[in-house]
Amino acid sequence: MKAPADANGMMSLLAANDVEGCIKVIAKSLGLPIQIDLSYVPSGYRADGRDGFTSTALVETAWGTRGGQAITAQVSLPECLPLYGTPGLDNYPIKVRVSRDCADKPTTFIAVMAHELSHVVLHSLWHREKDNEVYTDLTAMMLGFAPIMRDGRRVVKTTGEGTQTVIYGYLSDEQFAFAYGKIETVLSKYRKRTSEFLDKTAALESLLTDGKKTVVRFGKYLEYVDRKLQEKMPAEDTYRICVCHQPGYTSAIERATRDAEKELQRLHTFIQAFGCYNNAMVDAIRQHENQLWAVMSELSSAHEALLADVAILRKHVSPLYRLRVEGRTGLR
């Protein structure tokens, strides 16, 4: 299950007449790193199956209100496709034929093309239902195109004879609504889990930022106190300030900071690689969270200890200097 594809980005490419670019983005969203060999046919072209293309999608079904008269989208399916997810599919040439007016109804074209390329997905998986049009619609929906197909599957045409509704796809309205609802329910669960993980990642980022600023304040205040020693200072403050001068005194927070930075790099790499929502992804999130909490606990302890020292030093720093330092670090 994938998050919704970027419909606006695809439609922007169509608006710029970059049909090939749009199809490449659709293919990438479906996990197909293929090369698109694009050609055009005249508007109103109807395939007859004699030219090596298989016109499998979105042209005719048993329902009279259906049809693809306004949009032609055909994909050539070679007999032996490389297996899905293998290097053999990288830049594998796939022939795509579209009508020249395909950009007139961009959302519908994207829905049509997502269906056609979903045949490539199923064929490259050697799926037993690879030629089943209903399964192909469902594949496109589950791989992020459900909202686009919802918006593009129904086109209302007004002619001199009245209004005609053309439906693209192989699911009835009831079937589509049922599948869409199921997909949204599953995605909602995974989105919630992902959002919780991203919040925890953001919390580590915030703590790391605060920790770095606290280290700066500690250094500035200690330098100020050394330059302007006060004759009268509480004994406990004098003792703590002496302790602050020990070699490697800030090594704990410096080590925790480095560990947090490394962990955030790993987390960001993991987040960018989010692809499919599934149980394996949830397991991976759980593992990353365990490491995140360990790093965050270490950093939090070191930060709290240094904050206590900063509070002592701050009492012996002039108000003007405090404002200057705290204004630069953004902390009070």
Image (spheres, rainbow, N blue to C red):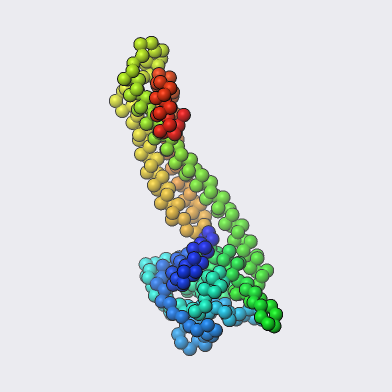
In the image, what residue occupies the spot 40% across and 28% down?
324
Q: Can residue 150 be seen in this view?
A: yes
Q: Residue extending furthest top?
A: 232
**Residue 46 occupies quadrant:** bottom right
Q: Name above or below for residue 332 compared with residue 109.
A: above
Foreground residue, 43 or 302? 43
Question: Would you say residue 138 is visible in this rendering?
Answer: no
- Classify residue 119 as left or right of residue 322: right
Query: Is 198 placed above or below 256 here?
Result: below
Residue 134: which quarter of the image?
Answer: bottom right
Residue 218 in the image, given as x and y percentages of width and height: 38, 27
Judged from this view, the residue extending furthest toward the right is 162
Q: Is residue 316 above or below residue 158?
A: above
Q: Residue at horizontal 40%, vertical 44%? A: 263
How far across and how far down the image is residue 193, in percent? 54, 49
Residue 216, percent across and down? 37, 31
Q: Is 203 rendered above or below residue 62?
A: above
Say which residue appears at 39% left-offset and 13% top-offset.
Answer: 233
* Residue extending farthest left: 247
Q: Nearer the viewer, residue 193 or 238?
A: 238
**For this rendering, which residue is in front, 33 or 99?**
99
Decide if residue 157 is on the left or right side of residue 32: right
Image x and y of residue 150, in percent: 61, 67
Q: Residue at x 35, y 34 (%)?
A: 254
- Could you tell me how many numbered marks the image carries? 0
Q: In this view, does 187 lie to the left or right of 248?
A: right
